[in-house]
Amino acid sequence: MPLLSFLAIGYSIPVIAEVIRWFEECIIRNYANPLAEQQILLSNDDISKKQFLTMMNDMGIGITGYRFDQQSNEFYLQRTLHDTLYELPFSSESDGTRKLFAALPVILMALKEGRLVIVDELDAKLHPKLLRYVIRLFTNPEINKNGAQLLFTSHDMSTMKNSIFRRDEIWFAALDSENSSEVYSLSELRKENNDPINNTAAYDKQYLEGRYGADPYLKNMLSWEV
């Protein structure tokens, strides 16, 4: 049994209880699983709803409202064109729209309450600019006033830039000789002269050049004979 769990179960220690609450409040989403897009958390609060719609429209999803139909058990997204209201079932929306509609309320909740949100495959089905928009929500102190944190996995190269992340914020997962995953930070890597990677380096370019490891060996793959 982990020591933290043992202390929480067997003793009444305020600081341990606080740590346990922090872990319990972490939000975990795996959008590699299609069922995650069906788990939609929406607030009935008018201010939260307005904020949600504003952010959706900022990202180019031009909706004016939404509603849930109890009989059909279906969400409908609403759009107003030429003063006429149109509705489209959530299941008929594009993959990217469904992903944003499901993920954004969770992200807003984390920002509002200062929680950690962990997302697998955050970049899946999202345009790189939309992924960058989500990251900026957490790195902008005017928006992230409560210290919320975002931990996500991604294969997107367009955000692996020094203008978006610090070196210690970029981590790689690489398979070793025993097919186990080794996780290490960009800040741990050293050049030939033992100096750290420059904080002005083109991280995406150097990664694709194979300088950081944790990449598929495309040259070997392309030389395979079928």
Image (cartoon, rainbow, N blue to C red):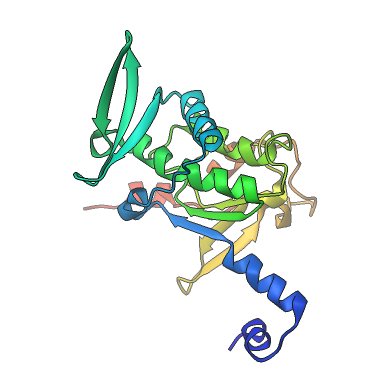
The residue most toward the bottom is 10
> For residue 79, which quarter of the picture?
top left
The residue most toward the top is 82
Q: Considering only vertical position in the picture, is 175 above or below 4?
A: above
Residue 106 on image: x %, y %: 50, 48
Residue at image x 76%, y 77%? Answer: 14
Q: Considering only vertical position in the picture, is 108 above or below 65?
A: below
Answer whether residue 55 is visible to the viewer in this image: yes
What quarter of the picture does the N terminus occupy?
bottom right
Answer whether residue 158 is visible to the viewer in this image: no
Q: Considering only vertical position in the picture, is 99 above or below 163?
A: below
Lateral position of residue 124 relative to residue 82, left or right: right
> For residue 3, which quarter of the picture?
bottom right
Count of marks placed on residues: 0
Residue at image x 41%, y 44%? Answer: 102
Give the camera-side residue of 120 and 175: 120
Q: Considering only vertical position in the picture, is 66 above or below 20?
A: above
Give the camera-side residue of 72 and 11: 72
Residue 42 on image: x %, y %: 44, 44
Give the camera-side residue of 16 and 125: 16
Give the camera-side residue of 184 and 136: 136
Lateral position of residue 25 relative to residue 194, left or right: left
> For residue 206, which quarter of the picture?
top right
Residue at image x 63%, y 54%? Answer: 115
Residue 187 on image: x %, y %: 72, 53
Residue 121 on image: x %, y %: 44, 50
